[in-house]
Image (cartoon, helix red, strand yellow):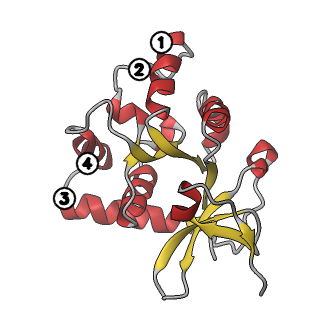
Amino acid sequence: MATITVREVRARGLAETHLQEKEARTLLEEAVADQTTEREYDIFLSHAIVDADDNDILGTKSLLEDFGYTVYLDWLEDPQLDRSQVSRRTAETLRRRMNCCKSLFYAVTPNSRISRWMQWECGYFDGRKSRTAIFPITRLRQEYYSGVEFVGLYPYVDQALDRYNQQRLWINRSSKIYVPFQDWLNGKEPFWHPS
């Protein structure tokens, strides 16, 4: 198993922008234009808003959708919210949206430490639904992700081939304790896999 790299998500984002001949933010906005407020999503992608203008978030969203999952990005659905300020209105909107999502992926990038909302989103979602995982976007491929600070409390997401040679997402507690993402969404916890 291996973490997903910045290079991979940027390449996926660039491929999408070149295919559509549009900028990343424009493509993301168009992708959610038809979505309704009560739609259920597989993944709430918690990320630093400063990452929204590069291909990292477009690439991450596209990569997750390539696996067949629906992805919610709060600033696309709710562009009226002011994320530079912590407010009751923004918090209530985010709570309502997170309640429509099955899981939360906490996208770890160099910018995630400065986000005003990510830690709050993670704590709220974990307390509400417990299907919270870290989505590390690493500079170099890592076979195991150890996390930093409180992020190490949660399982992490990576990708690897399954026994049928199909690329899948996995939820991991360690290199030997893991479960397919779809099974985790359905309530299973990561379990021990002998070598």
Instruction: State yes or no: discs 2 and 3 in contact (Cβ < 8 Å).
Output: no
Residue under numbered circle 2: 81
Q: What's under tag 2, amino acid-wise?
A: Leu
Q: CA distance from mark 4 to mark 3?
A: 8 Å
Q: Residues within 10 Å of mark 2 (few under 14, many from 20)?
A: some
* Element type where label 2 sits in the image: loop
Q: CA distance from mark 4 to mark 2?
A: 20 Å
How far separated are the C-alphas under marks 1 and 3? 35 Å
Q: Secondary structure at mark 3?
A: helix
| Sequence order check, earlier mark of 4 and 2 | 4
Q: Are marks 4 and 3 in contact (CB under 8 Å)?
A: yes
Q: Residues within 10 Å of mark 3 (few under 14, many from 20)?
A: few
Which callout, 1 or 2, points at the residue further toward the start of the chain? 2
Identify the residue at image location x=63%, y=60%.
188
Of the residues shown, which amino acid type is indicated by label 4? Leu
Please tell me which of labels 4 and 3 falls first in the chain. Answer: 3
Circles 1, 2 touching at the beta carbon (< 8 Å): yes
Q: Quadrant of the C terminus?
A: bottom right
Determine contact: label 4, label 1, CB under 8 Å: no
Q: Nearer the viewer, residue 118 or 177?
A: 177
Say whether residue 58 is left or right of residue 132: left
Marks 4, 1: nearer the viewer: 1
Q: Which residue in the structure is indicated by mark 1?
A: 89
Quote the CA–CA distance across marks 2 and 3.
Answer: 27 Å
Structural distance between the alpha carbons of marks 1 and 2: 8 Å
Disc sitting over residue 27 in the figure: 4
Q: Which numbered marker is on residue 20?
A: 3
Callout 4 crowding tier (Cα within 10 Å): few <14, some 14–19, many ≥20: some
